[in-house]
Image (cartoon, rainbow, N blue to C red):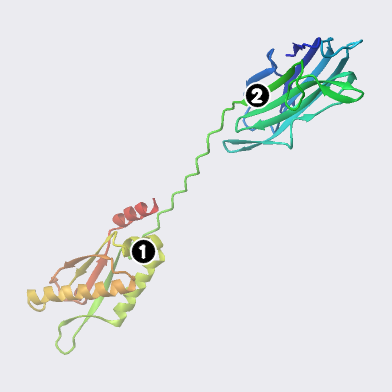
Amino acid sequence: MKIKIPSSYGGYIEVDALYKIGGQPHRLSLKSDGKVTDTISPEWNSFKQLEIFIDVEYELLVKPSSKFNFDIPPNGEGRLGYSATWDASFKDSDLKLTQQGSQPKPWGSPKQKGDVVIKGSTATAGEDKESVRVFVDLIIEWEDKGVPIPFTGGVGASKGPGDIVKLEVVLNLKMARPKKAEPPKPEPKPMPKITRDLTSTEVYFGVDTKTGKGQDKLQPSSLRDLLGWAKKIKEIEELYQVLSNGKVDIYLEGNTSKSGSKEFNAKLAQSRIDAVERALKSQLSSNRLAIVSVPKAQSKFEEEHDYRVDINFDKGAAESAIKALQK
């Protein structure tokens, strides 16, 4: 809404203020003191520029005074315009307003007629994160043969009778910010396939041909078999991690035949377990294996498969450890 400000020089100064956002102009309701503070709520990320316009139209008649003795009082009429523009940048839930150059800027083609003129002085514009401001001081001047002579006591003006019109427009932006998008949850890694041949294997020992007693040293063929099993474990990275870091128990069951005393066979079973444990730590490149020794001491039948160590771990325990690793 336009306002008319009476002047001590006679006549009036009419001021109008508008803002334009998203291409649509809107009038601001100025108060009688030439100030306005307004709050607008545009949609988030709905505009690229925000502009504020101040339009001033005047018609003045300078009354004679003791200081100025005019035969004919000077008079004048004219129109001024000022504008300030900000570029708006939206990013996620943040807004940045950037002022364009030195502002406010005069706009249009002011018409000025007569000896009394109004000129804008000490005009500034500023912004923060959610508001913009435009300040314009209007100084009334009398031109004597084209030379302006201020009548007001404004900054930089000679002291004398008169007035200065201060215009202030404040525009606050209040917008519903979008919620920051939650980072997408990573897709759960698929559980590696743990087949039966991975959860258990056997390592065989030979027999001393001279004594006929079972040995506790691994044969080359058995070492190759154990190396092949360890290689398959290493190919499944997550399974290898939980086994090599001792997160899953590895059971070593030592077997012997019924030949020999119970004490001898118990010692032989443990010796075979120790041999397999050393080989496993070497081939799995880890000293942190969770080895559980289970010496059986003596089997019911004296057959070749009695000269062995069974290696196994629980598939369910391995999968649980892998799930904990994937979190």
Q: What is the number of the mark on residue 138?
A: none
Label 1 to label 2, Cα distance in Å? 66 Å
- Mark 1, other Cα within 10 Å: few <14 / some 14–19 / many ≥20: some
Q: Quadrant of residue 278?
A: bottom left
User: Residue at 77% of width from left, 22% of height from top?
Assistant: 139
- Per the image, the residue denoted by label 2 is 170
> Height in image: 125 above or below 16?
below
Mark 1 = which residue? Answer: 240
In the foreground, 79 or 132: 79
Mark 1 and 2 residues: CB-CB less than 8 Å, in contact? Answer: no
Give the percent coordinates (x, y) of residue 293.
Answer: 19, 67
Helix, strand or loop at mark 1? helix
Q: Position of residue 269 (x, y in %)?
A: 16, 73
**Amino acid on which the number 1 mark rests in the picture:** Tyr
Q: Residue at x 78, y 14 (%)?
A: 14
Residue beneath the point at 50% across and 40% down: 182
Would residue 282 appear left or right of 211 to someone viewing this image?
A: right
Q: Looking at the picture, tell me which residue is in the foreground, 131 or 48.
A: 131
Helix, strand or loop at disc 2? strand
Q: Quadrant of residue 160?
A: top right
Is 32 in front, or is 294? 32
**Residue 305 visible to an observer of this rendering:** no
Q: Quadrant of the N terminus?
A: top right
Q: Is 255 left, or right, of 37 in this rendering?
A: left
Q: Report x, y in % for residue 218.
A: 25, 79
Residue 187's x, y, as percent? 47, 48
